[in-house]
Image: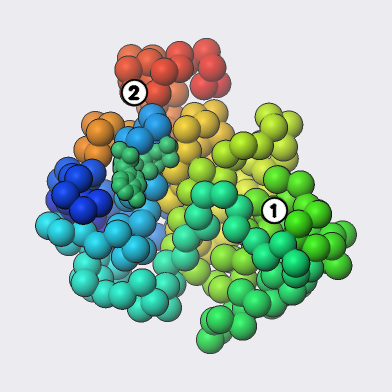
Amino acid sequence: MSILELDDVNAYYGNSHVLFDLAMSIEENEVVGLLGRNGAGKTTTLRTITGTVPRREGHISYRGRDISDESVDSISRAGIKLVPEGRRVFPDLTVNENIQVARDTCADPRPIEEMYDAFPVLADLRESLGQNLSGGEQQMLSVARALVQDPDVLLLDEPTEGLAPVIVDDLADVLSDVVKRDVTVILTEQNVDFTLSLSERAYIIEKGSNVWDGSVDDLRDRDDLLEQYLSVGSADAD
Ligand SMILES: Nc1ncnc2c1ncn2[C@@H]1O[C@H](COP(=O)(O)OP(=O)(O)OP(=O)(O)O)[C@@H](O)[C@H]1O
């Protein structure tokens, strides 16, 4: 059974129809990339899964339970955690305090030292204030804050946004260890290389609809898709 299933989901902002019959099926411990251009509906898909944007038609089920009408809190408590775009950390709290605050909101958190094992950079910075971290370090802290809550499903929204290429490589290295853990990951990105390096499978979304899904190995060879929907050629995606 899939861990997460979206069945012909339609979502709207007010009267503006944004997701059209979106269907996805995610297996436990898979790492799945959601690719698409600006405004394609990637963030809205994640927000719909977490209940922040209510779906109007269709169903979302998690471990076979229909969560379509559940509250944001209930979906979060069930184990689906979103790391939103924009690296939200508390600027006036230290790294350690940032992780501790996230732990405190959760009934059965992971040990804080596990986060420092996963993100050695953060271990060295544990007494530094959030506001003094680089963009890449803040992104690692955002992911650590979600992971310490021991999610079943981790939703990462554009983790590379605004990061310099060399930092993106560092983040990919660290996340490649993180995604090997006992966690299902859905990653939205415009950075195709980053997504292909971390994911096993991908969905391409265009104007709120699925236009393709398949293995990342297949996608690497699909110049036509990369050009049509993602504006890159396979030479860029190796
Ligand atoms: N709060 C909102 N109110 C109204 N429309 C919105 C809102 N947020 C997003 N939209 C619109 O919904 C559509 C999908 O946006 P979404 O942010 O999901 O795309 P995206 O694929 O994540 O894009 P990006 O890569 O630029 O973040 C876009 O047309 C966008 O303008």
| In the image, residue 36 above or below residue 94 | above
Residue in front for this viewpoint, 114 or 70: 70
**Badge 2 element:** helix
Q: Residue at x 78, y 52 (%)?
A: 133
Q: How crowded is mark 2: few (under 14 residues within 10 Å), some or many (20 or more)?
A: some
Q: In this view, does 24 lie to the left or right of 176?
A: left
Residue beneath disc 2: 229
Q: In this view, does 146 lie to the left or right of 200?
A: right
Q: How far apart are marks 2 and 1 (CA)?
A: 30 Å
Ligand 1 picture quarter? top left
Find residue 166 and report its horizontal and vertical position in percent: 73, 31
Residue beneath disc 1: 138
Q: Residue at x 69, y 53 (%)?
A: 138
Q: Is residue 166 left or right of residue 101?
A: right
Q: Which residue is drawn at 23% across and 44% down?
A: 18
Find residue 161 and report its horizontal and vertical position in percent: 57, 39
Which image quarter: residue 50? bottom left
Q: In which quarter of the image is the N terminus?
A: bottom left
- In the picture, the disc for residue 227 is none
